[in-house]
């Protein structure tokens, strides 16, 4: 019997959603005797849909399943009115729907139909002909011309040719069998991108039938991959914006090296690249042997990869490594200082924040909390929080400097970087001084580590020679040559920030807000965030420092996009696919927690409209926060640190304004795009068969 008949065509398909429409199509199979149990078949189709939506670009849906309730391979066609029904495609609702049904024991029948139908549906003339068809018979003729089942082979035809039965080439074996991958994901803050990338890679591997183990080098720590897991892997994927820790473990393995955001937006493609690379290495055993030999000899295993990465990307990775290690010190110090001010104001009134800064550990009077701590006194607790918080803040620049150097030169860079950062702090060179000493220390330590020395000296190089010479050169150059101009620059920057009023404050907020909303956790976003967190070191114990306003503006602006998209999916769900609506539910919590990455799935599907809307709305919020004078010491937390925010009601008002602007722009832009797409579809002239 043919795949499709006149009775299996519905030219006026309707339904509240895709499940109801699928049921209407399946009922036609029951009517033609091809389905023996409607509910069993519907359950099988829904089980397939739960794994991945079956919508295709161009207004198409292709629900399909094998089922014991189906007696023979079959197609049912449905055409929906102009508004369409959401079938999970990123570009909008579906108007052309094919239900593909195959018997449970029907071999690869539906896998024959699926690619033929998908290829045909990608042709504009095929879609236009279906949209213009005036009768079921016309639809059947159009489909029969493009989609047909091959006749089942006879046993003799099915027997393999003895000449063709040979051991496949290694590359072919690699392509045929499920592959094993290992991956490392990491981002500067180690909060969202790191784990979202890991999940995306795991989902992509599962869909492709491969295995993957992911090491997340995030803020919650990581469980390192074992040597056995790495050895068994066919290829390695690095998705990172900071340096991968202990990268040498992966020496001698084919490696795909990208930014963390690429894994979130295109995990399947990364695994395809890794599979292609694994096949290439399997086809060229000498390549793997060379890589293994280089690793055994101590050669840099990723030299080729480093050459392919641009200087700008390397610099950003080094800086973001420093920022990622600095952020926990900022969080601990900033929150403790903010808590100390809150407690002091409760205990001492308006003068509390001024009085509390007198307390310490070295004074010999009543302000020494080590000698006069009273567990029943709010003042003592406020002083304790202030002293500990201030101590944590004192490490910001040394840690920033030390781990920038660590990213460049590995462990040899830590000593000169941290010492250089401490000297920059003592000279009031601030975070700019920390950046300069970190880069200088890393470069010097890496250069000294590369020296070819006598084997008798080699043993003392890492513990004596490298730290001694690199620290002496780094600190000496900074004190005598580089420090004074950087101090002057920092002084000018701080004076400029302190002198900002009115329009200047608004413009700075607009710029920082736009940067936070532009790439949602990408390089531009991280520049603004790094500027804000590093600037906290200059704020010290001041209550109204401009750096605290900058931090508040940056955090509020970073919350706008995910919250706005969550709101847009709730207000106008038909403009979004089913996966996007699910992402919208999660985006409420992500946005409220200052995790901008909650908006990435939307930006990946519709980058221009989402980025434009996000940039404008985030700029509005950043400008208003600066204008309102809201302040913040914590580098992260979203609404969970609202009690620590100065002017919290105005902060929330500015955030709400940006969210409403972004949500409105998204709805307007996506609505206009949907109307244009429908108009083009309606105006399409069918091509005669």
Image (cartoon, rainbow, N blue to C red):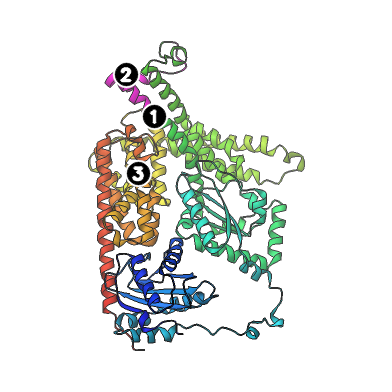
For the residues marked 3 and 2, what is the alpha-carbon distance in whole angstroms?
A: 31 Å
The reply to whether the C-beta atoms of the residues labelled 3 and 2 are less than 8 Å apart is: no
Query: Residue shown at 36%/20% (left/top)?
Result: 356
Q: Which mark is residue 592?
A: 3
Residue 641, given in percent of the width and then of the height, sits at 36, 35
For label 2, count other residues whose C-alpha is less than 10 Å away and answer few (under 14), some (14-19) or many (20+).
some
Residue that lies at the very extreme toward the top in this rendered image: 365
Residue that lies at the very extreme toward the right in this rendered image: 456
Q: Which residue is mark 2?
A: 347
For the residues marked 1 and 3, what is the alpha-carbon distance in whole angstroms?
A: 27 Å
For label 1, count other residues whose C-alpha is less than 10 Å away and answer few (under 14), some (14-19) or many (20+).
some
Q: Which mark is residue 540?
A: 1
Find out whether residue 343 is within the magenta segment.
yes
SS class of the residue under badge 1? Answer: loop
Q: Report the span colored magenta.
A: 338-364
* Nearer to me, 282 or 406: 282
Query: Residue shown at 36%/89% (left/top)?
Result: 689
């Amino acid at each position: 019997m043919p795949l499709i008949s006149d009775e299996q065509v519905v030219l006026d398909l309707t339904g509240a959603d895709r499940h109801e429409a699928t049921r209407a199509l399946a009922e036609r199979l029951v009517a033609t005797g091809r389905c023996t149990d409607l509910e069993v078949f519907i359950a099988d189709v829904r089980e397939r849909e739960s794994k991945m939506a079956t919508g295709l670009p161009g207004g198409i849906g292709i629900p399909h399943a094998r089922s014991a309730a189906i007696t023979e391979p079959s197609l049912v066609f449905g055409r929906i009115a102009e508004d369409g029904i959401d079938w999970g495609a990123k570009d909008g609702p579906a108007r052309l729907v094919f239900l593909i049904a195959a018997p449970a024991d029907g071999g690869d029948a539906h896998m024959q139909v699926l690619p033929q139908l998908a290829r045909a549906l990608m042709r504009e003339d095929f879609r236009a002909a279906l949209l213009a068809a005036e009768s079921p018979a016309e639809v059947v003729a159009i489909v029969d011309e493009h989609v047909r089942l091959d006749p089942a082979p006879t046993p003799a035809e099915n027997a393999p040719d003895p000449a063709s039965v040979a051991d496949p080439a290694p590359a072919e074996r690699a392509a045929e069998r499920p592959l094993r991958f290992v991956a490392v994901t990491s981002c500067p803050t180690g909060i969202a991108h790191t784990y979202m990338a890991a999940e995306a890679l795991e989902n992509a591997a599962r869909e492709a039938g491969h295995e993957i183990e992911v090491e997340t080098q995030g803020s919650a720590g990581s469980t390192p991959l074992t040597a056995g897991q790495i050895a068994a892997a066919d290829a390695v994927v690095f998705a990172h914006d900071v340096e991968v820790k202990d990268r040498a473990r992966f020496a001698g393995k084919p490696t795909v090296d990208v930014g963390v955001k690429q894994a979130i937006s295109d995990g399947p493609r990364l695994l395809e690249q890794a599979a292609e690379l694994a096949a290439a290495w399997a086809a060229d055993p000498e390549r793997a042997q060379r890589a293994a030999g280089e690793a055994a000899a101590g050669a840099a295993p990723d030299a080729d990869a480093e050459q392919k990465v641009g200087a700008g990307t390397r610099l950003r990775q080094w800086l973001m490594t420093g920022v990622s290690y600095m952020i926990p010190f900022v969080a601990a110090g900033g929150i403790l200082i903010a808590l100390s001010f809150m407690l002091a104001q409760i205990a001492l009134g308006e003068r509390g924040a001024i009085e509390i800064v007198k307390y310490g550990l070295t004074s010999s009077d009543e302000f020494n909390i080590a000698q006069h701590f009273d567990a029943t006194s709010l003042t003592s607790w406020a002083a304790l929080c202030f002293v500990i918080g201030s101590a944590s803040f004192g490490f910001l620049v040394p840690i920033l400097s030390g781990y920038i150097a660590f990213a460049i030169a590995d462990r040899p860079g830590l000593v000169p970087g941290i010492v250089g950062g401490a000297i920059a702090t003592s000279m009031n060179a601030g975070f700019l001084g920390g950046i300069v000493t970190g880069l200088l220390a890393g470069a010097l330590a890496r250069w000294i580590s590369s020296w070819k020395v006598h084997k008798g000296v080699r043993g003392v190089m890492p513990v004596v020679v490298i730290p001694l010479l690199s620290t002496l050169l780094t600190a000496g150059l900074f004190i005598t040559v580089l420090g004074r101009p950087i101090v002057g620059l920092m002084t000018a920057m701080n004076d400029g920030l302190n002198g900002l009023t009115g329009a200047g404050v608004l413009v700075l907020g607009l710029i920082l807000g736009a940067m936070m909303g532009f790439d949602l956790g990408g390089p531009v976003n991280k520049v603004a965030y790094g500027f804000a967190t590093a600037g906290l070191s200059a704020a010290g114990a001041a209550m109204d420092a401009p750096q605290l306003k900058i931090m508040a503006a940056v955090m509020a602006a970073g919350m706008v996009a995910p919250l706005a998209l969550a709101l847009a999916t709730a207000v106008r769900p038909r403009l979004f696919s089913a996966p996007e609506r699910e992402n919208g539910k999660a985006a409420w919590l992500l946005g409220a927690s200052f995790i901008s990455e909650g908006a990435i799935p939307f930006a990946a599907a519709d980058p221009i409209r989402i980025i434009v809307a996000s940039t404008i709305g985030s700029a509005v919020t950043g400008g208003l926060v600066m204008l309102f004078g809201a302040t913040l010491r914590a580098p992260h937390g979203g609404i969970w640190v609202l009690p620590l925010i100065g002017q919290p009601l105005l902060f929330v008002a500015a955030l709400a304004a940006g969210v409403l602007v972004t949500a409105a722009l998204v709805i307007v832009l996506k609505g206009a795009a949907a109307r244009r797409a429908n108009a083009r579809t309606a105006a399409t002239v069918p091509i005669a068969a």
